[in-house]
């Protein structure tokens, strides 16, 4: 079972622990105030995220990023429409976790979670499955704090899509460690099957080529 004991140990063994705890409480209070201001300021269409007490404003996506996201989102949404097990949302859905707020490229929520959504919902809980499409400006965040945070909040599956190398890294959550482990890394010649969206198997090429994407959809509709 995952434990934060190793993280807390330096503080627990420090003679200044009460003082450090007070500093942490003050920092947390200030950060939550900033988060409340972030919620007041953000508007529909803003590509803003709140990460570790800071507002991160993202630059416009490149064409290769947008195309990969749109194709994979279309595939996931089509599959879930044909095999209703939950709902798919894309980059406009803000995922509000314990500390941070993210706008993932694609997310999937099981029926258990999605049935609680209301028409005015705009802050979503931790998804069951998350996809992030890598770019030069976001790769370190996607591989760093987001990967750690999604795992800490119980996301079961995480894909990192690399448009430059036309590959996908598939991570699954370990019950023992509470962290993601690399289950597979697939390239354009391979197929990839989700472990959360039951039965959804696609060729990697379908994420990067329109003809391959439509071939998959036609096969599903037969």
Image (cartoon, helix red, strand yellow):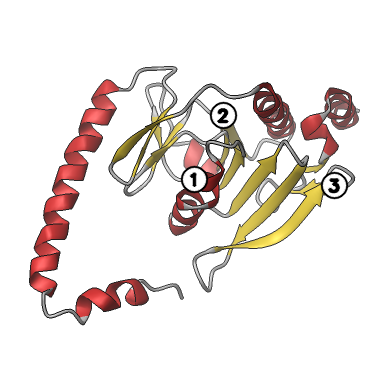
Q: CA distance from mark 2 to mark 1?
A: 18 Å
Query: Which residue is pictured at 70% across the width and 61% down the height?
Result: 183
Rendered position, 46 above or below 52: above
Of 161 and 71, which appears nearest the observer? 161
Horizontal and vertical percent position of residue 63 = 68, 21
3D distance between C-alphas at marks 1 and 3? 26 Å
Residue sitting at x 44%, y 53%: 149
Q: Is residue 117 above or below residue 170?
A: above
> Disc 2 marks which residue?
90
Q: Position of residue 32 (x, y in %)?
A: 20, 42
- Disc nearest the viewer among 2 and 1: 1
The residue singled out by tag 1 in the image is 141
Dot 1 falls on a residue whose secondary structure is helix
The disc, 2 or 3, on the residue closer to the chain's N-terminal end is: 2
Horizontal relation, residue 85 to residue 4: left or right? right
Residue, disc 3: 191
Give the mark nearest the N terminus, 2 or 1.
2
- Residue 15: horizontal and vertical position, in percent? 12, 80
> Does residue 208 appear to the left or right of 59 in the view shown?
right
* Viewer-closest of 220 and 56: 56
């Amino acid at each position: 079972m995952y434990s934060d004991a190793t993280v807390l140990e330096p503080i627990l063994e420090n003679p200044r622990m009460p003082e450090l705890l007070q500093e942490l409480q003050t920092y947390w209070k200030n950060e939550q105030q900033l988060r409340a201001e972030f919620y007041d300021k953000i508007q529909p269409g803003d590509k803003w995220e709140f990460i570790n007490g800071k507002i991160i404003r993202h630059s416009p996506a490149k064409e290769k990023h947008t195309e990969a996201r749109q194709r994979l989102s279309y595939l996931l949404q089509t599959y879930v429409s044909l095999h209703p097990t939950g709902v798919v949302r894309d980059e406009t859905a803000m995922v509000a976790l314990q500390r941070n707020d993210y706008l993932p490229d694609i997310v999937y929520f099981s029926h258990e979670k999605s049935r609680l959504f209301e028409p005015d919902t705009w802050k979503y809980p931790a998804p069951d499955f998350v996809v992030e499409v890598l770019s030069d400006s976001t790769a370190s965040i996607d591989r760093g704090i987001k990967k750690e945070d999604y795992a800490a909040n119980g996301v079961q599956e995480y894909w990192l899509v690399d448009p430059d190398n036309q590959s996908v890294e598939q991570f699954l959550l370990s019950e023992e460690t509470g962290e993601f482990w690399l289950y597979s890394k697939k390239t354009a010649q391979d197929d990839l099957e989700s472990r959360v969206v039951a039965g959804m198997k696609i060729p990697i090429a379908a994420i990067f080529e329109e003809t391959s994407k439509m071939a998959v959809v036609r096969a599903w509709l037969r």
